[in-house]
Amino acid sequence: MAQSPYSSNVEAARRARSQPLSRVVSGLTRKALDKRGFVDAAIVNEWPVIAGELIGKHSLPDRIRFPRDRSQPGTLYLLLENGALATEVIHFQPILLERINRFFGFRAVGDIKIIHGPLPKRGQDKRPPLPQIRPERRDEIEKSLEAVGDDELRDALTRLGEHVARRRQADS
């Protein structure tokens, strides 16, 4: 049975319209995130990595408020579920601000305001924890990065390489 030229055109149009899910979801959430002052959901999604395990587990960025002219850095409103943690956040505020601004790549946040209240329920992580990296793979990663002169960059690339290796090991 011969195909009509029309059916191949329809199929080509369908393929041309398909988009990655991340792009579609990003478009749907952009309006809500813009209202809260977030450029994208990355700071909320990556908060435990940015803030560290203790602070990241018991807090969540609520919004970022920028001055009208946007010439000055904004204020991050941080939702804390535990009042005792507020002292810890205040004590480590300079370090936390440095980590946040390093995440953005520029001085986006200049102050942190604390809001006390319950955190939204987090869904259970359905993925099992990643396996430990094999020692021979770790040696390969370290050997491949010997030429990198900057210690911080080498450490970051090592962590990235180990994470990718662990993810590949889990997927295989």
Image: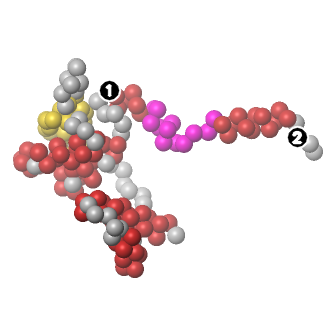
| Residue drawn at point x = 25 percent, y = 39 percent | 106
Region of the chain picked out in magenta, as a range: 17-28
Q: Residue lying furthest bottom in this view?
A: 136
Question: Residue 145 lies in magenta, yes or no?
Answer: no
Q: Is residue 5 left or right of residue 45?
A: right
Given residues 123 and 160, the one toward you in this image is 160
In the rendered image, is residue 117 in sight? no
Q: Report which quarter residue 4 is drawn in.
A: top right
Query: How would you rate the neighbour count of disc 2 (Cα within 10 Å): few for under 14, some for 14-19, many for 20 or more?
Result: few
Of helix, strand and loop, which one carries label 1? helix
Q: Position of residue 103 (x, y in %)?
A: 27, 45
Q: Position of residue 89 (x, y in %)?
A: 11, 47
Query: How would you rate the neighbour count of disc 1 (Cα within 10 Å): few for under 14, some for 14-19, many for 20 or more?
Result: few
Q: Which residue is mark 1?
A: 35
Q: Amino acid at mark 2?
A: Gln
Q: Amino acid at mark 1?
A: Lys
Q: Position of residue 95 (x, y in %)?
A: 14, 49
In the rendered image, is residue 38 in sight? yes
Of helix, strand and loop, which one carries label 2? loop
Query: Tag on residue 19?
Result: none
| Residue drawn at point x = 36 percent, y = 50 percent | 123
Given residues 34 and 87, the one toward you in this image is 34
| Residue drawn at point x = 14 percent, y = 35 percent | 111
Q: Which residue is mark 2?
A: 3
Which colouring convention does the figure follow? secondary structure
Q: Report which quarter residue 77 is drawn in.
A: top left
